[in-house]
Structures are given as C-alpha cells and as structure tokens.
Image (cartoon, rainbow, N blue to C red):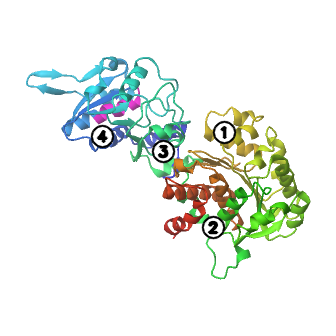
Amino acid sequence: MHRILDTAAMCEADRRTIAAGRPGIALMEAAGAAVADAAAGLVPHGARVLVACGPGNNGGDGFVAARLLAARGFAPTVALLGERARLAGDAATAASAWSGRVTAPGEADPRIIPLAQIDPAAFDLAIDALFGAGLARDVDGTAAAFLEQLAGTGIPVVAVDVPSGVDGDTGRVRGTACPATLTVTFARRKPGHLLMPGRSLCGRLVVADIGIPDAVIEGLAPRTSANEQALWRDAFPHPALDAHKYARGHALVLSGPADATGAARLVARGALRIGAGAVTVGSPRDALAVNAAHLTAIMLRPCDDAADLAGLLEDARLNVVALGPGLGRGRARALVEAAAGATHAADRALVLDADALTAFAGEHAALAALCARMGAVVATPHAGEFAKLFSQCAQAREAPSKLAAARAGAAALGIVLVDKGPDTVIAAPDGRAAINATGTPYLATAGSGDVLAGFVAGLLAQGMPAFEAACAAVWLHGCAGARLGPGLIAEDLPEVLPGVLGEVLA
C-alpha cells in the first residue's frame, strides 16, 4: 500500500481491471459505497446530506453514495453540475439508479437540483463529488462559486478521490478548492494527497479497496511511493553480534570556524545517535577549543583546508564525509572538490547540505562531475538551496510539481536528492521517488536540517544504500519531531531518536 499512482497510472489500473472482467459500474458501486460509509460515520442517522456531483465518473461515485445513504435512512440531495442528459457511461448508469425519495405522502421529489441553485449551508454534511484527481483545467464559474460557498459554511465535507480543484499529480490548486474533513480515494494514494498544498486540504485520508487487484497495480511498476517502513526496513542496518565500532562505519563531519561550529556538531550527534560506530569532527584549528568543549563520544581532528582534508581521507575507515553546514561557500566548495579527489573517494559516501550546495549555485553540472567520483552521494537542500543550485537546470526549474523537480534534480546530479519541506521528496537518479508524510511544523527550526544530514550520514556509514538511507532518515526525523512537538529544538532530535527506533524497528 505504500505505492503511489499518478492519475495516468490509475486510469490504466482501471482499464486493466475492467478488461480482466470486472465491470466499470462494479468499481463505481464499490467507490460510492466507501464514500457513503465515510459520510455516515461523520453525522447522525437521518442527517441532511448534500451530494454535489460533477459530469464525470467522480459524479457517478456521488450518485451511488446518495442512493446508498438514502437506503440507510439519511436525507441526501443531489446537486448536479451540468445537465443530466449529458452524463455518459457508468456515470449515466449510476444516475439512472438514483430516483430520489418521497418527502411527504403524495409529494414526489426527484432530488436532483442544479448546482447553481443549492445552498450548502442548509445541510449537515456535503459530499464533494465534482471533480477527481485527473482534473485537466482550472475550476471556474458555477463550480468555483459553489466550492467557495461550501468552504464558508463550516459543515463537514467528504471529498471523493481528492478535494475538487486539487491536481492529483501535483497537489496544486487549480483555481479554487474546498478543504475536506475527510477524503476517500481508491486503490492507492495519488501524489496530490501527499504534496502540498493538496495534502493540507485532504483532511483525514481513507484509501478504499474497490476491487482493483494488487497484481494489476504492481504490474504497472510504480516508481513513486509514500515514504513508509516497507520501502526501506529490509535494508536498515542491524549490528551483528560480533560487530565493533569500525564495522558500523566512521563518519567525518567538517566544522565551520569558531563562530559557526554548532551546525557540524548537530550533524555529528545525529550520525552517532542513528548508529554510526564512530564519528569525527574535522575542525579548523581556531575552533578546536570550542568544539572540544562540547564533544565527548565524538572525536576531533584539525582540518583547516582542502589539503588537511585530503590527509584525513587517507584513512579508508572514514567511509562517509558530511559537509556544508556552517562552512561558508568558498571553503565548502574547496572541501567538496577535495573529498571528490581524495584517496578512496570511489568507496566513500558523501552527504552535502547548506553551503556545499549553494557554493555551486547555477553550476549543477560542475557538482555532478565531482559527485560522479564518489561511491554514493546524498544532497539535502531546502527550497531556497534547491532553487539556487538548479537555477540553470530547466528540467528542475520548470518542473510541474515538487515530485517532478526532485526527480529532475536527482537525474541531473546523478545522486540521491532530498528536497526538504513539509512534503519532503526523496528522489534517486534511476527515477525512484518517495514522498514523506511524517513530521510536524515544529521541525521548521534552526538546526533541524543539520540533524537530518547527520541521520543520513550515520546510515550511510553503516552501509545502507543511498536511497533507502535517505528515506529512512527522513521518516525517522519526522517521527522524532512529531514525538517532541511544541518546544522542539534541534538538539532534542538525536536524543529522542532511540525511543523511536526502539518502537518502530524492534
């Protein structure tokens, strides 16, 4: 269930399921039943339910839900966008099965009202079945006016597939969208359920099984996943009984000058907490005393410049280098070049963040050439760093979504890229990508990203493959942040990690 289907893949899954013998109307009946169940769970028996139906299959799901809710004793009213005569296929079949209900003895009420004539404030709950994930244009006119009116009522809203107006592939709002209390989607999540701002508009998300076989979905070979344990747990490192510290890897973290040492210590602490057997901070000589005053289990070595780094990296046991935070752009670039040119570079992993990325602003090709010399590379830019690094990469700069941009950036650099934010995307150069769903807004605090870089470095040090290491680090970082919540500061994250690891990886 961690696989994510874009709208084209979802249409193909429907087509293959129907071709294998399950009628499209059976899929629609199952979808409508899931929506009816969700709606019935939000309001008391007999509640007034507005079902806003669009002209396509999303509206057909709404007609089914209305019929089933009426049979269960609720009071549904269908409001239709467009003319009933223009409905086609399974949606027309579903509409034909909706006959309304009798509101009083002898008083027939067809219960289909033009959308423009409905007042959503007169209802206890609304089902938004106007447009699905495959919306191809901006919402305007009658539909936009209705969604804005609905949003102002404050009544619970159940969205069918996605909140109408949300692009299922990008998460972007096309024109306008009404936030949902609960969204019912089918078979698998879509990118727009996890990418912002769509993610913030979906409310609670329910994925309903409507009869599309898992084998059909796996046959589509999806390249996008939700970042969940199933994606990386089998690759997560567990020390052997006879393990020693160097068997668990040795990470080198490079520090900034005396007035900018904290970021490197956060990286180092994160790497140590997540399981690296040994961590060393390479520090400018003028900052050795400052770093020594704060480090205990983490070792310390002098490292002023590229020549010093090259000397340190003669030691093959240093199997990961993490650099960027607090270094300054000029020094960071020189150190990246030194790491790529050092002895054993092809057998060593590299984690790049902060100044190590902005030092190559507009020069992603130069960075790619250096990364090609390393064994594995993970970069962890936030949105501003991403924009600077890829300012001359049209594929990343002009991508239609964050997911597409991260994929383009990973391909351009030939590395694993972590595009950070509330909807962090992890992308590999081979096209695999994962969208993260753990976390809390309280992670938006100074130093949080440095700890994440340390988590990545610590997992790479233990031999975890780069894509899986990045996914696991992001997921665990989000879980640690969610556990801490209000009052979180970056220093807390490594300290809460053992409890998270103990619960989820036992």
Residue ID at (86%, 61%) = 309
Q: Position of residue 407 (x, y in %)?
A: 67, 43
**Please, what is the three-letter code of the amino acid marked with disc 4?**
Ala
Instruction: Give the class, few, some or many, for how many residues have Cα within 10 Å of label 2's Cα (few <14, many ≥20).
Output: some
Which is more foreground, mark 2 or mark 4? 2
* Comes first in the chain, label 2 or label 3: 3
Q: Position of residue 381 (x, y in %)?
A: 69, 46
Residue 59 drawn in magenta: yes
Which is more foreground, mark 2 or mark 1? 2
* Comes first in the chain, label 2 or label 1: 2
Q: Are marks 2 and 1 in contact (CB under 8 Å)?
A: no
Region of the chain picked out in magenta, as a range = 55-65
Q: CA distance from mark 2 to mark 1?
A: 31 Å
Residue at which label 3 appears = 189
Residue at which label 2 appears = 273
Q: Are marks 4 and 3 in contact (CB under 8 Å)?
A: no
